[in-house]
Image (spheres, rainbow, N blue to C red):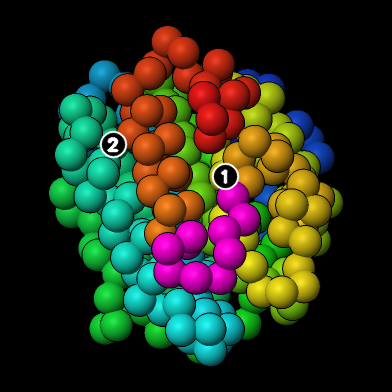
Amino acid sequence: MSNTVKDLFNSAEEEGLITAKAADVLAVVDIGNEIQAALGMPVDDVQASEVVLVTMMPDDSSSIRYENNTQTVCDGHNLVLDALIDSKQIDNILVHTRYLNGNILYPYCPINQAIKMDKNNYDPNQGTPLYDQTVLLLGTMLAKTQDFSDNGVPVRTVTLIITDGDDLCSKRANSAMVKTLVDDMLRTEQHIIAALGIADGHTDFNEVFREMGIRDEWILTPANNQGDIRKAFQIFSQSAVRASQTAVNFSQMAMGGFGS
């Protein structure tokens, strides 16, 4: 594990932001180098008094292509970026997108430097390592949060996990390990962790995400059609914009879910 990332996790544990159990999860999966690549813009280059991290993990499994949802997922991701660009807090927002199979579309960067998804950078043709990659995504977000915190910059985060299937090929993590991280993060009231499960006809996404620690009020389960999927992304984008504007009431919003 990279010393820099390891130091950030140690700092989070020392401050009581994660438990020893969560630290063990991050150590077991040994993801320091993969996290380092996603940390992006150095804290010293951010001239904001507070920061909102918006993180997305679009599914790039082959079923997305098979169900003809490639362009819909691209449009949904890009819709979120457009909504954030139009928000009043654009200077405070950093965004990061990593696909479900690990490829980084862009590391944490200002919203106006984010890369739109399109057919040239999104090729859904792989598997569904949902638990492995969620641990990696949350670990990245935790490390970036701690980096700002260590430098005296308040941080709020909003994260969206997108999948159209249950875990099929994780090798390092399971749902209980994900839940350990999610539970610790939510306890700090700094984080919103949401999930979007595109109907595949048999997966109970509410149960899948619940086992990962994600609260019911932050779960979206659109039908497998362009209109419903787009609407789900739009609901998330509205919540992300609100979260970027409501520092005082953030914990209340986090408890209220998409309806807050």
35 shown above or below 143: below
Residue 90: x %, y % from top left: 20, 34
Query: 47 left or right of 121?
Result: left
177 shown above or below 73: above
Instruction: Tell me which corner region of the image, top left, top right, bottom left or bottom right, holds residue 169.
Output: bottom right
Relative depth, front residue between 49 and 10: 49
- Residue ID at (68%, 25%): 187
Residue stretch rendered in magenta on the structure: 220-229
164 shown above or below 61: above
Q: Earlier in the sequence, mark 2 or mark 1?
A: 2
Instruction: Tell me which corner region of the image, top left, top right, bottom left or bottom right, holds residue 110.
Output: top left
Q: Which residue is mark 2?
A: 93
The residue type indicated by label 1 comes to Ala
Query: 176 left or right of 71?
Result: right
- Residue ID at (26%, 44%): 83
Residue 185: x %, y % from top left: 64, 33
User: How many numbered discs, if any?
Assistant: 2
Q: Which residue is mark 1?
A: 194
- Residue ID at (44%, 44%): 236
Label 1 CA crowd tier, 10 Å (few <14, some 14–19, many 20+)? many
The residue type indicated by label 2 comes to Ile
Query: In 3D space, how far apart are the residues under numbered discs 2 and 1 (Cα atoms)?
Result: 18 Å
- Residue ID at (18%, 39%): 86
Residue 220: x %, y % from top left: 59, 50
Query: 18 left or right of 109?
Result: right
